[in-house]
Image (cartoon, coloured by chain):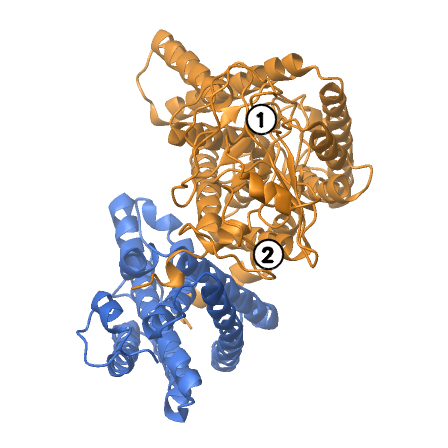
Chain colours: A blue, B orange
């Protein structure tokens, strides 16, 4: 509904991503390229899922369950593949650093690359699942789905996109850390959390379900953020919490 | 404390991706505003539609066949014009080329720009009178021509005008009917491969001629800012293209034995203009070509350890991004008016330092005034390359075709726009990587255009219904 509404929805879905981008990513060109690359990889996985399930949609409601399971499986497989790609790039960057007499990658660098990759996934999700639907929202009216008379479609989509953006961003941090350190519990945490969040959105299919569905999604995002925060806190030693000061201590805590 | 590697890697790529993104964004905004969904845009009669004029009632086969014929004819005309420009360059009709270049840029800015402005004024109901509008338009176009071709101006102004020229031409191209647009894009991508890689390709011949003659290739180029300031002093100012004062335009830097292509370091020299000693500015060369936009990335002469990313890494004395050593030249072309064709310029990989892609013959050349380190000259033995500058250069034709693709995607839905944008940027990155790996002249258009077309059709046919269905059921993943 009107320009203000449309912009509002867009900001709900992408505001935190924008601030993350400006503070962490914009100053380092390599991270910008990482965001674009991981967004493209997410898009390819989405197209693959679409190819798989296009014939079944629009269809019966029960189709969503196997659809979600297979789709989450595909995306987690892509995440593992992305991790292997990242290892090669990390190797390359370290060699490059040696040749130009600069420091090799330190823990904060790796965390930043993980954030950038996760943000690429998250932004791609938000853009395709929310932003591209928002064009009608700039008009004079709004739209309610049958199963959710409490909130317009755009609002539900915006909040859910926000939740998934945060989830994708920080589960990439967790995943990188877990795969590097070979921690089983965290390795399992990421796909399980992703699957939980996806299945919880099925609650939205029930009449009036979005009242519960949206907060549940956001809660999943908060849990993921907490776990990722704890990992980063542990990893960077006893320095203060913000990323900038970590640069000062990283020489002491090279991991 | 040493600076981290992450600070500087990739700066040049971002400095080229940014203006491409801005151009695409402007075209999408224009298309979205001025082309309401569902309206039938009356196709304009152009040379691209000589053979077949698409009507909505034609069958699919008719449209495909007609579009295909249009594309073939267009590519043939482009090829002929490229050869004509090559001939002009060969016989040294530089003044003719220069005048043509300035004239065509003025036409783009004044005529196409004026048309777009009139449409915008009508859409937003802006109260402005004809006389004011005329004066503003003439001034805008004149400053644009001067900024791009003739004078040293603040580089932001030159860059801005180049992006605007690319945007206007791309917007004009989106007015073509749908099937013709797609077949045109695909035909130009195929032609690009041929023109760059085949031995008789006009662009390849043009580049080699310029190398042997040690002259600048006429081109319309976007030049990105150097990432970090260079310590090299600029070349001494000259008032003519005398060769006694200036060093050779094309120096052949040899590649190390196991390697890479060579780079030719070209020096910018502006005939009749004083070359600014500021490294960041481009000088307009006297030889102005036809529709060639040459794009080459040049770097300032760097320390002897400079090498190529990937096989010989550089230890640059400057703090420049390490990708400085991998510069690619992407060439694009600029269609001047409906009767003008565009050529594609091959992507030429110069060698250890620069990679140049010469896409098309374009009017106007932009070279960087550059100081050449004599020791580096001796170090190299063969190969060719293009001008040395601190910045990455991209030909305007690439801007145009990328924006045409994205603009046409915008006519369907914003989801296709996002998908095509990611595809094009991915293709651009892949082209740069291939350039670094293969080290030879490579066309800039094919990978991006083919990825973009594939993603457009996949998104439109498969992903759009999939995502919309999921979203309207409020199921996300």
In this rendering, does residue B472 appear at all?
no
Q: Nearer the viewer, residue A206 or A91?
A: A91
- Identified at 28% across, 45% down, the residue is A2
Residue drawn at x 40%, y 80% is A175
Left or right of A108 in this view: B89: right
Q: Residue beneath label 2, please?
A: B433
Vertical position of residue B394 compared to residue A15: above or below: above
- Is residue B347 or residue B161 the one in the foreground? B347
Question: Numbered disc 2: what chain?
Answer: B
Left or right position of A228 against B332: left
Q: Position of residue B433 (x, y in %)?
A: 59, 56
How far apart, in angstroms, are the residues tagged by discs 2 and 1?
Answer: 26 Å
For the C terminus of chain A, which image quadrant?
Answer: bottom left
User: Residue placed farthest to the bottom in the image?
Assistant: A184
Circle 2: element type: helix
**Is residue B280 among what the camera can see?**
yes
Point out residue A234 in the picture as x, y percentages from the top left corner.
25, 83
Which residue, given by chain and number where applicable, does mark 1 sit on? B365
Q: Considering only vertical position in the picture, is B250 above or below B379?
A: above
Locate residue B62 relative to residue B295 in the image: left or right: right
Q: Residue furthest top?
A: B131
Residue A207 figure quarter: bottom left
Tell which subunit mark 1 falls on: B
Which one is earlier in the sequence, the residue at label 2 or at label 1? Answer: 1
In this image, A110 relative to B261: left or right? left
Callout 2 environment at 10 Å: few (<14), some (14 to 19), or many (20+)? some
């Amino acid at each position: 509904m009107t320009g203000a509404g449309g912009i509002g929805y867009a900001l709900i879905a992408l505001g935190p991503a924008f601030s993350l981008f400006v503070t962490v990513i914009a100053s380092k060109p390599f991270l910008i390229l990482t965001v674009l690359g991981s967004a493209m990889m997410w898009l390819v996985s989405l197209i693959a899922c679409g190819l798989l399930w296009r014939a079944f949609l629009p269809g019966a409601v029960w189709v969503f369950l196997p659809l979600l399971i297979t789709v989450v499986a595909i995306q987690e497989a892509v995440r593992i593949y992305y991790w292997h790609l990242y290892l090669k790039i990390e190797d390359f960057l370290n060699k490059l650093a040696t040749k130009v007499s600069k420091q090799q990658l330190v823990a904060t660098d790796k965390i930043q690359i993980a954030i950038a990759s996760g943000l690429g996934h998250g932004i791609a999700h938000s853009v395709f699942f929310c932003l591209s639907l928002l064009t009608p929202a700039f008009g004079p009216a709004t739209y309610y789905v049958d199963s959710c008379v409490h909130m317009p479609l755009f609002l539900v989509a915006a909040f859910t996109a926000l939740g998934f953006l945060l989830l994708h961003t920080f589960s990439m941090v967790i995943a990188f850390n877990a795969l590097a350190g070979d921690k089983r519990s965290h390795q399992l945490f990421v796909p399980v959390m992703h699957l939980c969040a996806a299945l919880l959105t099925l609650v939205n299919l029930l009449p009036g379900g979005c009242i519960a569905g949206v907060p549940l999604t956001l809660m999943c995002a908060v849990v993921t953020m907490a776990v990722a925060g704890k990992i980063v806190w542990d990893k960077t030693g006893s320095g203060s919490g913000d990323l900038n000061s970590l640069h000062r201590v990283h020489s002491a805590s090279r991991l | 404390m040493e600076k981290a590697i992450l600070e500087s890697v990739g700066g040049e790529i971002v400095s080229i991706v940014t203006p491409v993104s801005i151009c695409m964004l402007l075209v999408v905004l224009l298309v979205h505003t001025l082309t309401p969904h569902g309206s039938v845009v009356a196709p304009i009669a152009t040379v691209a539609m000589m053979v077949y004029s698409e009507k909505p009632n034609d069958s699919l086969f008719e449209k495909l066949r007609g579009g295909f014929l249009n594309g073939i004819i267009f590519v043939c005309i482009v090829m002929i014009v490229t050869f004509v420009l090559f001939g002009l360059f060969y016989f040294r009709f530089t003044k003719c080329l220069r005048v043509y270049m300035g004239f065509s840029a003025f036409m783009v800015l004044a005529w196409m720009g004026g048309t777009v402005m009139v449409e915008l004024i009508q859409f937003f109901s802006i109260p402005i009178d004809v006389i004011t509008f005329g004066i503003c338009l003439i001034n805008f176009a004149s400053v644009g021509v001067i900024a791009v071709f003739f004078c040293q101006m603040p580089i932001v102004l030159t860059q801005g005008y180049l992006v605007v020229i690319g945007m206007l031409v791309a917007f004009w191209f989106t007015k073509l009917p749908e099937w013709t647009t797609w077949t045109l894009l695909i035909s130009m991508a195929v032609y690009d491969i041929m023109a760059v890689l085949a031995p008789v390709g006009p662009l390849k011949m043009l580049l080699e001629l310029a190398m042997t003659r040690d002259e600048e290739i006429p081109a319309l180029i976007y030049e990105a800012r150097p990432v970090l300031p260079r310590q090299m002093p600029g070349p001494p100012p000259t008032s003519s293209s005398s060769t006694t004062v200036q060093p050779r335009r094309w120096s052949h830097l040899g590649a190390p034995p196991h390697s890479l292509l060579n780079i030719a370091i070209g020096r910018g020299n502006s005939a009749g203009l004083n070359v600014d000693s500021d490294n960041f500015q481009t000088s307009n060369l006297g030889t102005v070509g036809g529709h060639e936009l040459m794009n080459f990335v040049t770097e300032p002469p760097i320390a002897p350890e400079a090498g190529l990313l990937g096989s010989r890494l550089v230890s640059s004395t400057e703090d420049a991004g390490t990708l400085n050593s991998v510069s690619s030249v992407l060439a694009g072309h600029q269609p001047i008016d409906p009767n003008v064709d565009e050529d594609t310029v091959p992507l030429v990989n110069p060698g250890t330092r620069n990679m140049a892609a010469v896409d098309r013959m374009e009017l106007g050349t932009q070279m960087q005034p550059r100081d050449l380190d004599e020791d580096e000259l001796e170090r190299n033995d063969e190969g060719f390359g293009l001008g040395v500058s601190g910045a990455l250069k991209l030909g305007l034709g690439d801007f145009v075709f990328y924006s045409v693709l994205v603009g046409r995607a915008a006519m369907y839905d914003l989801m296709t726009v996002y998908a095509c944008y990611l595809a094009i940027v991915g293709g651009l990155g892949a082209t740069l990587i291939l350039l670094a790996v293969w080290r030879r002249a490579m066309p800039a258009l094919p990978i991006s255009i083919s990825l973009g077309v594939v993603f457009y059709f996949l998104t439109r046919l498969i992903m759009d219904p999939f995502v919309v269905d999921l979203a309207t059921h409020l199921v996300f993943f």
